[in-house]
Image (tube, helix red, strand yellow):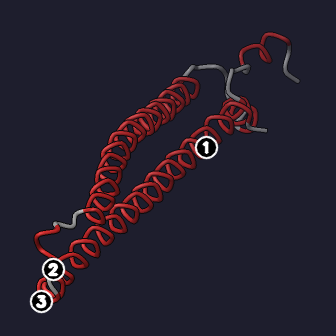
Amino acid sequence: MANKTDEKKMTSKYGIVNMIMKDRKLGDDGTLEKFFDKQVKHLKREIKIRDQNIDASTTNYENKEDELLDELEDAKEALTDAYKDVDPDKIKNNANINAFEEEYWTKINRLKNSISTIEYSLKVHKAYYTSTIENYEKEIEELTQKINLIKNFK
């Protein structure tokens, strides 16, 4: 039976080290502690990298979103202007009206398509960002679970 000094030697801040030492009836030589210190340090570094990736992804997303929103605003303004862009000199008679009509609607349809494309880009960009962040958060959760397992192994 182990006395109090033997039990004190077998105490580690990591539950997994305590279990290994107990199962293998090992003394405290520090090797296991050092190994798991390095593992926890490595896992914490990986978490920090994921956190930095989240910050960078968020900054990139916000910048791109601002850019796309500006483009959308400009495109909507251009569409409003296109509806009002009727030169009275170009529609003086029926022949001119027929010629101008195609030009008028082509311009409006082109601008509507441009707006749709920008709105689609915004949706795709947001979905990609959301997916990326969810993946990083899942990885952080898995890394944190590994740290907790090492610390609290029973």
Q: Is residue 88 left or right of residue 22?
A: left
Viewer-proximal residue among 133 and 97: 97
Q: Is residue 101 left or right of residue 18?
A: left
Q: Residues within 10 Å of mark 3 (few under 14, many from 20)?
A: few
Residue that mark 3 sits on: 95
The image shows residue 65, relative to residue 92, as above or below, that is above
Instruction: Kindly state the secondary structure of the residue where label 1 is placed.
Output: helix
The image shows residue 12, relative to residue 88, as above or below, that is above
- Discs 1/2, front: 2
Question: In the image, what residue occupies the spot 40% across and 38% down?
Answer: 53
Residue 100, numbered label: 2
Amino acid type, callout 1: Glu
Residue that mark 1 sits on: 141
Instruction: Kindly state the secondary structure of the residue where label 3 is placed.
Output: helix
Question: In the image, what residue occupies the spot 61% across and 35% down?
Answer: 147
Residue 96 spot, x, y in % from top left:
12, 83
Q: Is residue 146 left or right of residue 101?
A: right
Q: Residues within 10 Å of mark 2 (few under 14, many from 20)?
A: some
